[in-house]
Amino acid sequence: MSAVIIQTTCSSKIEAKNIAKVLIDTKLAACIQLSDIESFYSWNDEFCSDVETLLSIKTRKENFEKVKSKIKELHSYDVPEIIQIDITNSSKKYLKFIGDNTNE
């Protein structure tokens, strides 16, 4: 089993917690960490700065498309960040935790 971290950002902690709960309840993710961040970006040729909540979603690599679909369904942004980061090094016990707590 290959494990990944999927990242997305939300405009509110309420939205982030809702997405996290759904992903955990449906066994699409084993663990999700929420972090308060400040994002700087360009949108419609304007400089923007927003306080957001970053979700770091730990799951199986093969779950990426299902997680992406669920995030799009629940997310308020027109273009949510949904990126996959491969976990290249981890303890076997942590990889087992991810595998034991997610659906194939």
Image (cartoon, rainbow, N blue to C red):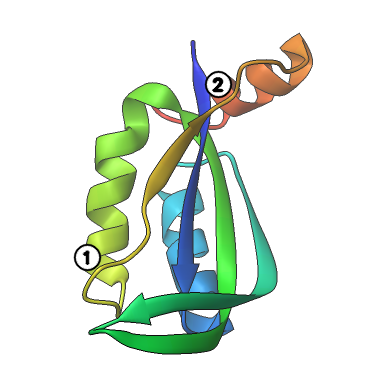
Residue at left offset 49%, top offset 10%: 1
Q: Is 97 on the left-hand or right-hand side of 102? A: right
Which sits earlier in the primary sequence, circle 2 or circle 1?
A: 1
Residue 60 image position (x, y, % from top left): 46, 26
| As drawn, 57 above or below 54 | above
Give the Cα separation between the discs numbered 2 and 1. Answer: 24 Å
Q: Quadrant of residue 51?
A: bottom right
**Which label sits in the foreground, 2 or 1?**
1
Q: Quadrant of residue 27?
A: top left
Residue 70 image position (x, y, % from top left): 28, 55
Q: Secondary structure at mark 2?
A: helix
Q: Would you name the residue on which mark 2 appears?
A: 99
Residue at left offset 29%, top offset 48%: 68
Residue at left offset 67%, top offset 25%: 97
Q: Is residue 104 visible?
A: no
Q: Is 36 on the left-hand or right-hand side of 41? A: right
